[in-house]
Image: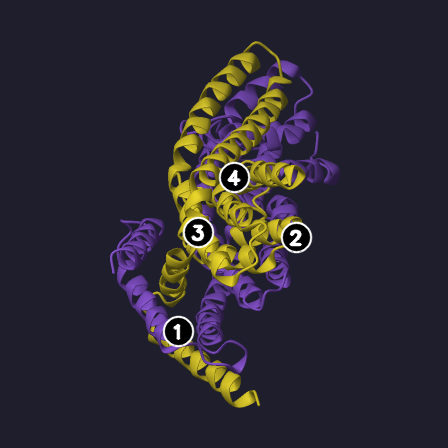
Chain colours: A purple, B yellow
């Protein structure tokens, strides 16, 4: 019975940065998934015809948060190994686990990476960059990638060890705790950034600046209640209004 | 100058790659690309002023599901790049402010319009995926690697092309305005900058707080404490 080796998992992990290279509206990450997963199939199916059939099946629709996709890749490698050994009775079992894991990891990963870690890293970077320093960009990059790259590269092996139960209570609770802690710290960080903008280097800004910053905060909190128009469209509107105010004063 | 412009446009391609097709390490975020451009052009104040505003607005733009978000990767490079090119050789602070305002506006427009080339690129990827599946059915396993390579080259080319076009149009179209109306533009910057910063920070705060009073209290306490430290802590 062929078994997936550590080097196969390392090859899968090395391919994960290209998971979204061929992202499209039909299959989303499907083709990228097949590309990342190919080393596992090469190991498990020496017969080229069977391997090609499995590869074609793995190009089917798949989408999840790209970092946590590593966990799914590892878990499905474990399941595919069982299937190749004839231990999994149903043929569509792999596809079903992919679908379930994709949805569950997306729900958790979107909250962790897009709604919490990325804004947190951005705030940290902005706080340092306000003093005109290059360290802000470095802090943003390191803060995000300490989590992102660890999960991306080690996630495949973790997923393989745990199998389809990878998102069990233990890991889910740890990631949920990380979301809660980062949200709390993030709220404090936004407070520190606002204070740094109001009193940069101990010198208070002008009253006009302080009032307009407060106005911007109020406008932002009001507009954040609705998804549309987007913050970018609001920002464009604000810019146009400021230009009009100065030009036609 | 030409080497700096070339590096700026190439950075647009690299940012477009990092945003979705390759790695997603946040190298594409406006603060990171803005800092790199500051080092390339040697104008830290202008670059960071524009990058900070665009970064706060970009942080609340999320690439979830099949949604095509505003393209802040190329938008950040074009916004900061426009401000730097327009400000090159102008020593006065008010002209820096004028160029920063134009840079942020150009960055926002580039990011908004940028979802169209992204959608076009993703449609092309559909054709690529169908071609790849056809080749796989015929027994050509190498088609998978070829499709990945083609998609990466396409994303880089779209990023570089879109960045070059937007930067070219913005610089040519706004050079006269930046010189002739710099005082008015600088006044508008002093009004718009805090509004933009507040708008971006509020969006981020909203994402963190999620209607929980404890987090609102933590925000308030941190604001007051940091304000006190800044005021009392300095001589």
Does B211 sit above or below residue A150?
below
- Dot 2 or dot 3: first in sequence order is 2
Badge nearest the viewer, 2 or 4: 2
Residue A156, percent from left and from top: 63, 44
Query: Which element type, helix, strand or loop, lies under badge 1?
Result: helix
- Dot 1 or dot 4: first in sequence order is 4
Q: Residue at x 30, y 64 (%)?
A: A221
- Which residue corresponds to mark 3? B104
Indicate which disc residue B39 carries. Answer: 2
Screen quadrant of the N terminus of chain A = top right
Query: Which element type, helix, strand or loop, lies under badge 4?
Result: loop
Badge nearest the viewer, 1 or 2: 2
- To which chain does the residue with label 3 belong? B
- Dot 1 or dot 3: first in sequence order is 3
Residue A235, percent from left and from top: 34, 54
Does A157 sit above or below residue A52?
below
Report whether mark 2 lies on the same chain as mark 3: yes
Badge nearest the viewer, 4 or 3: 3
Q: Residue at x 68, y 25 (%)?
A: A42
Residue nearer the viewer, A155 or A233: A233
- Dot 4 or dot 3: first in sequence order is 4
Farthest residue, direction top: B138
- Which residue corresponds to mark 1? B215
Distance between mark 1 and mark 3 Cα atoms: 31 Å
Screen quadrant of the C terminus of chain A = bottom left
**Marks 1 and 4 close (CB-CB < 8 Å):** no
Residue B101, percent from left and from top: 43, 54
Q: Residues within 10 Å of mark 1 (few under 14, many from 20)?
A: many
Report whether mark 1 lies on the same chain as mark 3: yes
Query: Which element type, helix, strand or loop, lies under badge 2?
Result: helix
């Amino acid at each position: 019975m062929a078994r997936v080796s550590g080097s196969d998992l390392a090859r899968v992990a090395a391919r994960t940065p290209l998971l979204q290279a061929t992202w499209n509206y039909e299959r989303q990450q499907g083709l990228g998934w097949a590309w990342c997963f190919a080393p596992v199939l090469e190991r498990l199916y020496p017969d080229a015809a069977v391997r090609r059939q499995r590869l074609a099946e793995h190009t089917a629709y798949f989408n999840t948060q790209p970092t946590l996709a590593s966990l799914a890749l590892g878990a499905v490698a474990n399941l595919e190994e069982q299937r190749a050994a004839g231990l999994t009775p149903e043929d569509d079992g792999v596809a079903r686990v992919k679908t379930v894991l994709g949805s569950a990891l997306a729900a958790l990963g979107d909250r962790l990476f897009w709604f919490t870690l990325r804004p947190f890293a951005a705030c940290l970077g902005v706080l340092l960059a306000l003093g005109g320093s290059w360290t802000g960009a470095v802090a943003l990059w390191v803060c995000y990638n300490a989590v992102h790259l660890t999960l991306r590269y080690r996630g495949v092996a973790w997923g393989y060890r745990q199998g389809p139960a990878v998102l069990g209570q233990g890991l889910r609770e740890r990631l949920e705790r990380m979301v809660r802690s980062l949200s709390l710290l993030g709220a404090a960080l936004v407070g520190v950034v606002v204070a740094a903008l109001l009193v940069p280097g101990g010198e208070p800004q002008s009253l006009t600046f302080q009032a307009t910053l407060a106005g911007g905060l109020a406008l932002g909190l009001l507009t954040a209640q609705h998804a549309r128009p987007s913050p970018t469209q609001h920002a464009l509107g604000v810019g146009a209004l400021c230009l009009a105010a100065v030009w036609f004063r | 100058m030409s080497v700096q412009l070339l590096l700026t446009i190439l950075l647009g391609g690299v940012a477009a790659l990092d945003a979705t097709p390759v790695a997603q390490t946040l190298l594409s975020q406006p603060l990171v690309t803005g800092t790199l451009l500051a080092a390339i052009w040697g104008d830290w104040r202008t670059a960071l002023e524009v990058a900070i505003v665009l970064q706060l607005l970009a942080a609340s733009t999320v690439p979830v599901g099949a949604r095509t978000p505003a393209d802040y990767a190329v938008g950040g490079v074009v916004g900061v790049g426009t401000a730097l090119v327009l400000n090159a050789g102008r020593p006065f602070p008010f002209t820096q402010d004028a160029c920063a305002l134009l840079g942020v506006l150009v960055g926002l427009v580039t990011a908004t319009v940028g979802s169209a080339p992204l959608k076009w690129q993703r449609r092309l990827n559909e054709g690529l995926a169908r071609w790849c599946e056809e080749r796989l059915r015929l027994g050509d396993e190498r088609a998978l690697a070829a499709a990945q390579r083609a998609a990466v080259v396409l994303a880089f080319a779209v990023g570089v092309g879109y960045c070059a076009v937007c930067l070219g149009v913005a610089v040519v179209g706004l050079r006269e305005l930046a010189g002739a109306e710099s005082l008015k533009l600088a006044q508008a910057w002093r009004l718009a900058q805090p509004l933009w910063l507040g708008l971006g920070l509020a969006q981020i705060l909203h994402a963190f707080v999620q209607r929980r009073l404890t987090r609102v209290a933590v925000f308030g306490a941190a604001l007051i404490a940091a304000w006190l430290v800044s005021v009392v802590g300095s001589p």
